[in-house]
Image: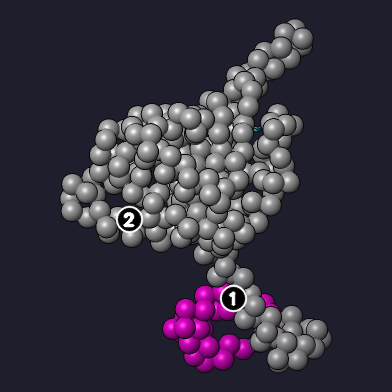
Amino acid sequence: MSTTRIEEPPHLVADLKTLCLATMGSQWPRLAEEARRKRQGHADFLADLVSLEVSGRRERRIQRRVKDARFPVLKTLDGFDFAAQPEVDRDTVLELARADFVDAQANVVLMGGVGTGKTHLATALGLAVCQKDRRVRFLTAADLTNALVEAKKAGRLSRKLEQLARFELVILDELGYVPFDKEGADLLFGFVARVYERRSLIVTTNLPFQRWSEVFLDATAAAAVIDRIVHHATILHTQGESYRLRDAKERLVEGEEAE
Ligand code: ADP
Ligand code: MG
């Protein structure tokens, strides 16, 4: 078998670069060698090379989506201990991770006490949705509200809302942790009303629905928000003691046993 390298056709690499076909540019020698070794036909060689470009692009696009989502910490569903949350149905969560709810403009509400895995689940679902090649943005409710207040002050509210509406899924973390003033509450309400049935939301909150009026400062506004979010929503309740606390206690006990 010949071991001479396949000669690089003039212009090939430059042309691929002009067309922004980076993966094809770097991978063609390897695939060409392989094609010669396997006596692969031209059409199959071309198909393999193009398919490598397509998958390379998808991978880079997904990396960009994960970066653009600005998750505070990356968490995965594999890293979630479902046994610690028997109220959270694993199959329901895995189904959500397929991202069909995003295509259906449906929502997810994660409700429960501090440290029970709401942000973990929301992040892991967001990551899964990114991996399905959808645009995701993670924000705390306070960050979003502040951004809206700032944008309004600067006369750029509609531009800001438009910017946010480009994301197919917005994750609103920690609704209810920080109370808003009237303006903030109204702007957050405006945001929910705007994305309703056009985009998906994942909301995490420590407050049961009866107490959302404390966030929106107005029972009518709260009812309107709940109505919109819950209309097409999966509601997951996380329960029990803080996972971190439990984990720390278990380690403490194990340590004592080991002594
Ligand atoms: P919450 O947002 O409900 O306050 P977090 O999702 O931030 O809680 O969880 C607190 C910490 O505990 C995180 O580091 C998270 O990864 C971890 N954690 C919580 N629940 C679980 C779980 N069921 N399995 C694995 N890790 C968990
Ligand atoms: Mg949290």
Between residues 19 and 100, which one lies in front from this camera angle?
Answer: 100
Residue shown at the point (48%, 87%) measured from the top left: 15
Q: Disc 1 marks which amino acid?
A: Glu
The verdict on label 2 being within 8 Å of ligand 2 is no
Task: Name the element at disc 1.
Answer: helix
Q: Quadrant of residue 179?
A: top left
User: Residue 40: where, in percent of width, then height?
Assistant: 77, 88
User: Residue 140: where, in percent of width, then height?
Assistant: 41, 39
Left/right of residue 234 with respect to residue 206 in the rendered view: right
Between residues 200 and 70, which one lies in front from this camera angle?
Answer: 200
Q: Which mark is residue 31?
A: none
In which quadrant will I find the C terminus? top right
Q: Is residue 183 magenta?
A: no
Q: Which mark is residue 161?
A: 2
User: Residue 228: where, in percent of width, then height?
Assistant: 47, 48
Can the viewer see residue 26? no
Q: Which residues are magenta?
A: 7-32
The residue at which mark 1 appears reads as: 53
Where is 177 relative to 37, above or below?
A: above
